[in-house]
Image (cartoon, rainbow, N blue to C red):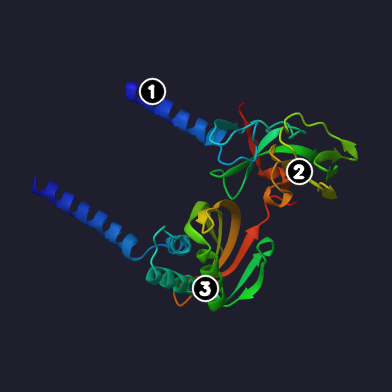
Amino acid sequence: MFLIRISLVAVSAFLFFSYICTPFTIQGTSMEPTYPNGGINFCWRLRYLLSEPKRHDVVAVRFAGSRVMLLKRVVAREGEQVEFRDGRLFVDDMEVVESYVRFPCDWNLPSRRVEKDCVYVVGDNRSMPIENHYFGQTSKARVMGGPLW
Amino acid sequence: MVKGRYFFAVGLMVILGVVLAVTVFPSEEKRVKKRVRLLSEWVSKSPGENSFTMLQKIKDIGTLFLDPCELKAPHESLSGNYTRQEISAYTGTARSHFLQLEFKLYDVRITFPEEEMAKVTFTARLIGKTTSAEQVDEIRELECHLKKMDRKWFFSQVEVVEVLKK
């Protein structure tokens, strides 16, 4: 009986931490200072089961699988026009106040419309030149969830 | 007792036979995976790599590709058909900029859409230190097509999947 209980706990823990609440370590400075390099967190994969990612949500974007993911912030949703002017974010020609961006930024990016079933994601750390920051539009199907905290 | 030993011996021989068959005749999936792992091994560079190993690896990398092979990586300025020599030369040049390089693979998924054709998708992570002491950590999703020729698998197309489109 004890062995069955132990096995059930082990199997449940494995399923929970593999498919529902996946632990991850943050490698890189793209989301600083909100999520510093070396931090530990969990990806809550049920977050967008019944809802859609909203602007300002921090999301985990997958590559070929779930072992390597990008942590980014949603700044625009499908159909919206997104643009950067001297480091300031504009969505549909309206400036968006981003309290989470703490480092100086001088980015300029011409306006572009977010395609259907996509979201536009950017990291919080925009202190580097725009060409050195990995950001852009991604399919909603690639959004695996969001960090637990 | 004798019967029990007989069954044990037969069982052991069957298990050994299965293990031997799997080892000697690996499945097509394992053969494809091995080619992808070789690519990872040969692209990687250890800190004190000697010239002989470097030249051997550069030469070996070309043998993994079909001649020509289509590369689709517009952001890396690589688009079109490349010969084995060109791929070897390009890899050699790229490797020479690094003191140390690690090409890691994650989430490797292999499917066989057609006979003698394999499609492999994986996340590739390139971690290294350049000769100017700059740290590099790049991640890309790759989609590769391999063709089977003379019982060997060769990369016929390599595409960098655009996960984030600026």
Residue B55, by quadrant, is bottom left
Residue type at the position of mark 2: Tyr
Badge 3 marks a residue whose secondary structure is helix
Residue B116 visible in the picture? no
Q: Callout 2: few (<14), some (14-19), or many (20+) C-alpha neighbours within 10 Å?
A: many
Which residue is denoted by mark 1 in the rendering? A5
Looking at the image, which is closer to me, B34 or B52? B52
Position of the N terminus of chain B by quadrant: top left
Residue type at the position of mark 3: Ser
Residue type at the position of mark 1: Arg
What distance separates the C-alpha of mark 2 from that of mark 3? 37 Å
Residue at image position (54%, 35%) is: A19
Q: Callout 1: few (<14), some (14-19), or many (20+) C-alpha neighbours within 10 Å?
A: few
Looking at the image, which is closer to me, B136 or A5? B136
Residue at image position (56%, 45%) is: A68
Q: Position of residue A60 (x, y in %)?
A: 64, 38
Badge 2 marks a residue whose secondary structure is strand
**Residue at the limit of the structure toward the front, as seen here:** B132
**What's the chain of the residue with tag 3?**
B
Mark 2 vs mark 3: in front:
3
Q: Is residue A134 above or below residue A97?
A: below
Mark 2 vs mark 1: in front:
2
Q: Is residue A34 above or below residue B161?
A: above
Is disc 2 in contact with disc 1, using a CB cutoff of under 8 Å?
A: no
Q: Which mark is residue B8?
A: none
**What's the chain of the residue with tag 1?**
A
In the displayed structure, does residue B72 sit left or right of residue B88? right
Which residue is denoted by mark 2 in the rendering? A120
Q: Position of residue B12 (x, y in %)?
A: 21, 53
Which residue is denoted by mark 3 in the rendering? B88
